[in-house]
Image: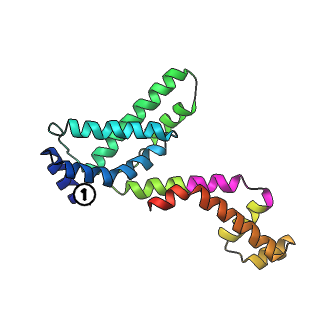
Amino acid sequence: MNQAADILFEEMRKGEIKAFEQLYKTFHPKLFAYARRFILDTETIKDLLQELFSDLWNKKESLHIETSVSAFLFKMLHNRCIDYLRSRAAKDRLPSLSALRLSELQHRYYDIEVDPFHAIFTAEINRIVRKTVEDLPPQVKEIFRLSREQGIKSSEIAASLNLSTRTVEKYLYQTLKILKKRLTDYRARR
């Protein structure tokens, strides 16, 4: 993809709108997912991406990329996220979620040359799963962990917890349903 993106970038620099549109279609979902890791407000992310792609088009003739197009775009967005979070932290004048996210963004910058899409989605999905499981009632959490983390069969879990197999399966089904709902955005993009 890097070579194809490089070709599209060069065509865009020559004013080819179709190449720009293809770059947008290719990178927008990946960039959105990356920004979402640090900025929770989707409208803000949309604004940042709109500005990024506007600048990309408006400054196309003067842009020179020394890395890959992917790395260049992620670095542009990375800088915009930092700027946004700094301005939010300054406005709030308090230790805030924005300040914490800024710190995380500055210290946990992904190696975007490898596969940013996969790394970002994996980290975000793992975070959502951990949070969802932690929020479960104690018995349901235990059943889910025994089943999914230790690979124990429903009948064995039921026997060890003095429950019916049907109850164990019902709890597992409900947990998976909750996870499916919370991961809907991520399932649609993969």
Q: Is residue 97 placed above or below 154 in the rendered structure?
A: above
Give the quadrant of the C terminus: bottom left
Residue positioned 49% across, 35% down in the render: 103
Coordinates of residue 96 in the picture (x, y in percent): 57, 29
**Number of numbered callouts drawn:** 1
Q: Is residue 157 left or right of residue 65?
A: right
Majority secondary structure in the magenta region: helix
- Left or right of 121 in this view: 173: right
Residue name at image x 61 percent, y 58 percent: 181
Residue 147 versus residue 40 in the image, above or below: below
Please tell me whether residue 127 belongs to the stretch shown in magenta: yes
Secondary structure at badge 1 equals helix
Which color scheme did the rendering employ for the protein? Answer: rainbow
Under mark 1, the amino acid is Asn
Q: Kindly tell me whether residue 181 is visible in this rendering.
A: yes
- Asked if residue 112 is positioned above or below residue 180 in the image, the reply reads above
Q: Quadrant of residue 116?
A: bottom left
Residue bearing the label numbered 1: 2
Tell me the quarter of the picture where residue 153 sits: bottom right
Mark 1 surroundings: few (<14), some (14-19) or many (≥20) residues within 10 A: few
Q: Which residues are magenta?
A: 126-139
Residue 122, given in percent of the width and then of the height, sits at 49, 58
From this viewpoint, which residue is outermost toward the front?
17
In percent of width and height, residue 159 lies at 83, 76
Name the outermost residue toward the right.
162
* Nearest the eye: 47 or 76: 47
Query: Is 39 positioned to the left or the right of 96 in the image?
Result: left
Please provide percent x and percent y for residue 84. 43, 31
**Does residue 131 belong to the magenta stretch?**
yes
Which of the image's four quarters has the N terminus? bottom left
| Residue at 70% in and 68% down | 173
